[in-house]
Image: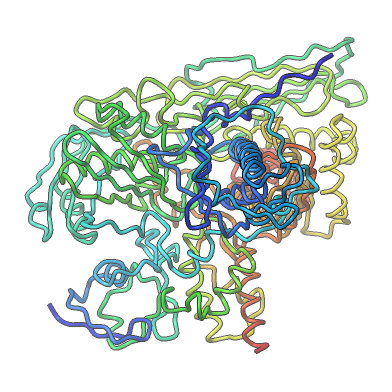
């Protein structure tokens, strides 16, 4: 059998031109231009490490270029924990090929075989003190050529930087108050804009008096198009004052009814749905079912609640060219939707990335970019910065979708699982821009001639699925059926939030398993290991258990719980042990995690992501729930949407199982599911009550106690 | 408009403005600073914290008049790459952030704490930072960085 023909990594196949990734600058620097963007996850550093490693240059020479539709490779969206997998592999391969191209050229110039040449910090040397460098050769080598399959990146043992906890290159700027965030970026002649949004869900702007806003000092323009209204002023304070005036002078129609926030499962299960069988497995031999257990798990709508409100800048050049600065996760995708709404060919729109605050999925970054483009049109030639209010950020952006999950297990006479069924009712988890023929940007729904509201869909299983993400058991049960019911109505706007459906599904699976193990009187870790076949899975389960001293003898008032999953069933493996204290409230004291991402390019970066994911998941589990009455989202501030505080954050210990020989995958979403389940299971261990309705607040504990 | 005088990062500063304007708007607007960040506008998240005399305050709900004749320190005044504050060194050493947007305010709360209590316990650090929100989950790294800075400062 012959070896399969080598192929290019995914992102490099889509963007094969080598010069679009790497350029040698005259000043001894190397510019590296990935299509993925920094969203607080440290990706830019990990990619710099990979490039510097393959090229044999000091990482200090690497200049990372922010993604822009004007020049960068199109790598779609920075999401799904795929940046290392996509961008990292593409850069590694491209740099390996570039290195070979330069070695061949050096060999010719120096008259020695390329096999005896060495590269150290970009200087190429050979026997007899012959020497040249990337920069000397750069003039005569064009990288305007396509990558070819088969370039051989360095062997693991030769990598000097990848696998090391290199310090992040963006951090010094952030501690020394050097401008890095879009919110802090000053452009000459910068104006400020604000958009007026109604409180009631999808209310229409029926009337608006503009005169008070126009009287604000520094006033430039009011922009009104249907229910979209905003103001542009010389100063930020002026824009705020004008917005306040507009708000007072606005009349809104009644909005659309929202569901009952206290019975999300009933709402989700009563709506028209599109049903899909995600997977089935039929038993090789039939087994005798003695009884059936059935449970329902619910997770609420969850807000992104980034620390900074979303922000964008736009500048029109004449009637038909616009430059947009954004912290969107996908500059090309945003450009597509801007093109649809603005009715401009994509060539006339440039979208450039600037950093925003932490991004955990499809937040209002894209929405505010359209807002800025619409407002800036009223001030031709001048850049306009638009920033959302805290309240709008908490109420008008897309939320992570609520889910109702029914899990059923047929058990044999010994209490072992013979068949497993898992059904999900949930809104779709994806309505990102740039994917369809209709835009999904908020202002697009508000214009005089509005675009229809895009009902969220789900990515296909091949891409990890949406509501069904992580719903197929990782355990070797003899038979199963997994179904997903996606809602065709969407009174509460939803789209991608970290893990999509995985947090809800792993919560359901891992808590149900815990319950079945407990009924059998079997240790939950032993139970899992008995049903797992994948050795990497078993390794993280054992590593987390060992590190946490599983199972510690419980003192009164404390409890321990376990959770495991492999993100998307194909990504990072992660197991978590939670130690909690519980009485009328739950306090998570310690989380112990083990993770396997294959090759950890920057181990401290992986730990940072897992730690952050674990803490964020703890916040989701203990506190978070988007609140609403029948007319409006009411959780519009940090008081109404509390998140975990410093004094409430658990100790987090992370063990990284380094597998340098395995292609790397992302770490940002691996911890949420396992941690959620581990906390819920620890609550049972501590208090003897199963809370299946998140978040685990005092009220929910009382409700669960009353039920049981 | 009345003139309000205060010291900003050590330098005498005068500003003609409505005394009821918010300190954050003045710092980020006419004074052109970007250390303090807007997060909520309601004093709830702490991204805008600055030190007024010895206390970390949320500049988004502090009126300008209240800082007249006082010392206002923003992240810009904490230290520089050439002469970093121990906290700045420690935040780099501990890689104490993910996105770093909240860090501008966190550093100011921490600096105010260390001024009042040079050797805080971990619990005291957490209490001092409890009104600063971090959404990325970097709290433990931040606490380690503050304790590291305290150790460094007391050791020298």
Q: Position of residue A365 (x, y in %)?
A: 39, 43
Q: Which image quarter is the N terminus of chain A in? A: top right
Res A632 seen here: yes
Q: What residue is at 77 percent from the left and 48 percent from the top?
A: A158
- Picture quadrant of residue A678: top right
**Of residues A604 and A364, the one drawn nearer to the viewer in this rendering:** A604
Q: Which image quarter is the C terminus of chain A in? A: top right
On screen, residue A653 versus residue B61, left or right, reads right
**Of residues A279 and A198, the one drawn nearer to the viewer in this rendering:** A279
On screen, residue B144 versus residue A40, left or right, reads right
Above or below, A558 relative to A13: below
Q: Position of residue A491 (x, y in %)?
A: 40, 29
Q: What residue is at 81 percent from the left and 37 percent from the top?
A: A537
Above or below, A272 relative to A61: above
Q: What residue is at 23 percent from the left and 36 percent from the top?
A: A321
On screen, residue A83 versus residue A600, left or right, reads left
- Picture quadrant of residue A419: top right
Q: What residue is at 71 percent from the left and 30 percent from the top?
A: A569
Above or below, A523 relative to A339: below
Q: Position of residue A558 (x, y in %)?
A: 78, 57
Q: Position of residue A392 (x, y in %)?
A: 34, 47
């Amino acid at each position: 059998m012959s070896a399969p023909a080598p192929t290019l990594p995914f992102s490099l196949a889509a963007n094969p031109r080598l010069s679009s990734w790497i350029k040698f600058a005259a000043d001894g620097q190397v510019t590296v231009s990935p299509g993925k963007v920094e969203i607080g996850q440290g990706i830019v550093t990990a990619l710099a490490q990979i490039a510097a490693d393959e090229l044999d240059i000091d990482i200090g020479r690497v200049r990372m270029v922010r993604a822009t539709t004007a020049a960068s490779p199109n790598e779609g969206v920075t999401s799904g924990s795929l940046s290392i997998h996509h961008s990292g592999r593409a850069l590694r391969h491209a740099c390996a090929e570039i290195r070979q191209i330069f070695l061949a050229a050096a060999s010719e110039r120096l008259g020695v075989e390329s096999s005896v040449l060495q590269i150290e910090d970009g200087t190429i040397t050979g026997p007899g003190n012959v020497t040249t460098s990337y920069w000397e050769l750069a003039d005569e080598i064009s990288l305007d050529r396509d990558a070819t399959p088969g370039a051989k990146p360095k062997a693991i043992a030769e990598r000097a930087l990848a696998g090391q906890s290199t310090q992040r290159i963006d951090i010094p700027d952030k501690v020394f108050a050097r401008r890095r965030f879009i919110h802090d970026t000053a452009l000459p002649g910068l104006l400020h804009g604000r958009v007026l949004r109604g409180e009631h869900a999808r209310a229409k702007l029926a009337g608006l008096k503009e005169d008070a806003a126009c009287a604000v000092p520094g006033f430039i323009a009011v922009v009104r198009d249907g229910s979209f209204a905003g103001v542009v002023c010389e100063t930020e304070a002026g824009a705020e004052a004008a917005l306040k005036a507009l708000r007072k002078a606005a009349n809104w129609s009644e909005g659309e009814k929202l569901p009952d926030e206290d019975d999300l499962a009933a709402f989700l299960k009563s709506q028209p749905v599109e049903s899909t069988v995600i997977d089935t497995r039929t038993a090789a031999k039939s087994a005798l079912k003695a009884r059936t257990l059935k449970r329902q798990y619910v997770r609420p709508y969850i807000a992104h609640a980034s620390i900074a409100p979303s922000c964008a800048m736009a500048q029109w050049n004449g009637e038909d060219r616009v430059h947009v600065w954004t912290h969107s996760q996908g500059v090309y995708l945003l450009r597509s939707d801007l093109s649809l709404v603005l009715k401009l060919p994509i060539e006339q729109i440039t979208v450039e990335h600037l950093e925003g605050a932490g991004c955990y999925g499809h937040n209002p970054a894209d929405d505010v970019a359209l807002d800025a483009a619409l407002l800036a049109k009223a001030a031709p030639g001048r850049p306009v910065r638009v920033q959302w209010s805290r309240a709008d950020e908490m109420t008008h952006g897309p939320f992570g979708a609520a889910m109702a999950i029914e899990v059923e297990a047929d058990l044999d006479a010994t209490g072992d699982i013979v068949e497993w069924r898992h059904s999900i009712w949930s809104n779709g988890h994806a309505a990102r821009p740039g994917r369809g023929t209709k835009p999904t940007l908020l202002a697009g729904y508000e214009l005089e001639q509005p675009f229809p509201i895009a009902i969220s869909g789900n990515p296909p299983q091949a891409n990890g699925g949406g509501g069904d993400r992580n719903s197929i058991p990782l355990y070797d049960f003899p038979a199963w059926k997994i179904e997903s019911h996606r809602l065709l109505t969407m009174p509460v706007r939803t789209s991608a939030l970290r893990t999509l459906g995985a947090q809800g599904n792993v919560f359901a699976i891992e808590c149900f398993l815990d319950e079945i193990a407990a009924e059998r009187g079997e240790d939950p870790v032993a139970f899992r290991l008995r049903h797992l076949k994948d050795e990497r899975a078993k390794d993280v389960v054992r590593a987390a258990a060992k590190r946490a001293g599983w199972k510690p003898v419980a003192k009164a008032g404390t409890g321990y719980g376990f959770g495991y999953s492999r993100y998307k069933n194909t990504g990072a493996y992660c197991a978590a042990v939670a130690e909690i204290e519980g009485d009328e409230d739950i306090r998570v004291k310690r989380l112990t995690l083990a993770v396997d991402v294959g090759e950890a390019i920057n181990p401290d970066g992986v730990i940072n992501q897992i730690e952050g994911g674990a803490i964020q998941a703890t916040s989701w589990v203990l506190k978070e729930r988007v609140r609403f009455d029948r007319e409006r989202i009411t959780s519009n501030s940090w008081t109404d949407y509390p998140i975990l505080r410093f004094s409430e954050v658990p100790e987090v210990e992370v063990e990284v199982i380094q597998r340098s020989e395995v292609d790397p995958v992302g770490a940002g979403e691996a911890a949420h599911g396992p941690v959620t389940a581990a906390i819920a299971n620890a609550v049972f261990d501590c208090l003897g009550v199963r809370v299946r309705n998140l978040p685990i607040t005092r009220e929910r504990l009382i409700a669960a106690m009353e039920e049981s | 408009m009345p003139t309000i005088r205060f010291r900003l990062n050590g330098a005498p500063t005068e500003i003609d403005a409505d005394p009821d304007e918010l300190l954050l708007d003045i710092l980020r607007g006419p004074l052109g600073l970007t250390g303090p960040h807007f997060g909520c506008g309601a004093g709830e998240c702490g991204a805008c914290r600055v030190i007024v005399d010895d206390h970390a305050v949320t500049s988004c709900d502090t009126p300008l008049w209240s800082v007249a004749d006082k010392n206002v320190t923003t992240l810009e005044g904490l230290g520089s790459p050439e002469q970093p504050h121990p906290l700045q060194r420690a935040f780099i050493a501990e890689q104490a952030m993910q996105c770093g947007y909240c860090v501008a305010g966190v550093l100011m709360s921490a600096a105010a704490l260390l001024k009042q209590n040079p050797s805080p316990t971990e619990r005291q650090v957490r209490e001092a930072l409890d009104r600063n929100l971090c959404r990325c989950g970097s709290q433990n790294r931040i606490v380690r960085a503050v304790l590291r800075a305290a150790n460094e400062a007391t050791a020298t």
